Image: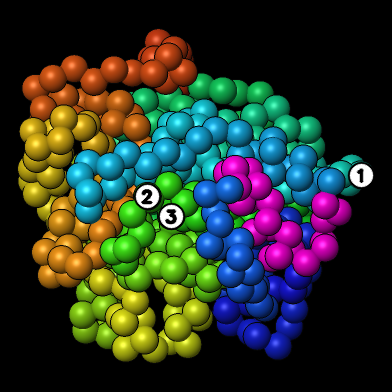
Amino acid sequence: MKLYSTKNKEQFFSLQEAVLKGLPDDNGLFMPEEIPELPKEFIDNLENYSFQEIAFIICKHLFKGVIPENDLKSLVENAINFTAPVVSLDENIHVLELFHGPSLAFKDFGARFMAQLMSYFNRGNDRELVILVATSGDTGGAVAAGFYKTLGIKVVILYPSGKVSDLQEKQLTTLGHNIAALEVEGTFDDCQALVKKAFLDKELNRAVRLTSANSINIARLIPQSFYYFEAYKQIKNKSKPIVFTVPSGNFGNLTAGLFAKKMGLPIAHFVAATNINDVVPEYLESGIYTPRPSSPTISNAMDVGAPSNFARMLDLYCSSKNVMTDEIAGYRFTDEETRQGIKEVFDKYNYIIDPHGAVGYLANKAFLKENPTMQGIILETAHPSKFIGEVEDTLKTKVDIPERLAILKDKEKEATSIGIEFNPFKSWIMGNY
């Protein structure tokens, strides 16, 4: 498997280089030289394969022998060891529940797979690997859980102060051991900017082995394609074309869906669902991409004003807005509309959905109204208990908290507060690793 940078298609990197490096030196993003189309027989018979078998077959075709099959099977089995069930609200509206992993968010799939892959590639290296990760909510908890006590790897999580839920914050600030948290006095975009600057700083990279665990790292993105196949497999009636509706912030999840389609999964359309941080829906309408500072919302994991994976989307569509809009529709919703969506799903289907899923529900509803011959799968990206205050206030009903989240409530937060300037952040990294 070879990969190139979105800013330079002439230079190629191995999978190991791309995974451990995180970002190319030119600040582009790694992309596979080839996204292979999977055998039609496999696609047509997905129901005969387990989730783990689907993940293994995808990796086998994508990696092209980079990892021996027995090692790859073991890697996949250790990473993808929880379910991704589809719940049908009615015959045309389905919810793909991606919150059955250890941190109760879809990021568990990518984080656990990446932890296994990095650990495999890092074997025999006596230099510690330091992972930098910016989070707007769920990524930090998933990465913390995925890499907890992994030998030879330390994790530094940057999160925006006051802009993640209480339980999300506890997930990334209470583990300790090889997990450190930095509370940034700024936005997610500020956190992400610090991480990107760190990878471009030559002095820092000479002193510390750095890599990334955000969806800017290709190792996070690849496993997110697995559950598109798993979801498609579970839809019994495939006579109606299937559209995937994806609540979107940094757009890694939607980009992974585009990978799945390129691999041959018959996805009729994608719906990019955002809150008021709507730079991609705006681009789909106008052809003009205008990144800007993010605004806080109740669907905080989508509070991204400069989505990194948009560069990958442009690469996949050869920077053609017209081609992109043939396959992706964009919708945005306010907090008040999101609350109405949470209430509507509960009143109509007796199903509790989190704020991000509610944005997806509203976008799916709007798209199906314009395209009544299709059916939609909404990616429900996090368990509603992670946003318990907002959901309970909206529904006036109690939300059960899974035990693995409830035990964090009384744990003490451990985080270091920093500003948005790069040099103090750089000094902290060099002083601690």
Name the disc covering residue 232, or none. Answer: 3
> Does residue 181 lie above or below 114 as drawn?
above
Q: Which residues are magenta?
A: 49-69
Q: What residue type is disc 3 on?
A: Tyr
Q: What residue type is disc 1 on?
A: Gly
Is residue 156 something that shows in the picture? no
Name the disc covering residue 236, or none. Answer: 2
Residue drawn at (8%, 33%), measured in percent from left and top?
347
> Does residue 56 lie above or below 22 as drawn?
above
The image quadrant of residue 148 is top right
Is 166 included in the stretch rendered in magenta? Answer: no
Pick whichever of labels 2 and 1 is earlier in the sequence: 1
Q: Residue 116 placed where, x, y %?
A: 71, 42
Residue drawn at (64%, 59%), measured in percent from left and top?
58
User: Which tag is nearer the camera, tag 1 or tag 3?
Assistant: 3
Name the dominant secondary structure of the magenta segment: helix
Which one is nearer the viewer's eye here, 75 or 12? 75
Q: What residue type is disc 2 on?
A: Lys
Q: Residue 417 placed where, x, y %?
A: 45, 35
Total of numbered circles in the picture? Answer: 3
As helix, strand or loop, the secondary structure at mark 3 comes to: helix
Residue drawn at (75%, 78%), measured in percent from left and top?
12
Is residue 401 something that shows in the picture? yes
Q: Residues within 10 Å of mark 3 (few under 14, many from 20)?
A: many
Residue beneath disc 1: 124
As measured in the structure, the alpha-carbon distance from the residue carrying label 2 to the one carrying label 3 is 9 Å
Name the disc covering residue 265, or none. Answer: none
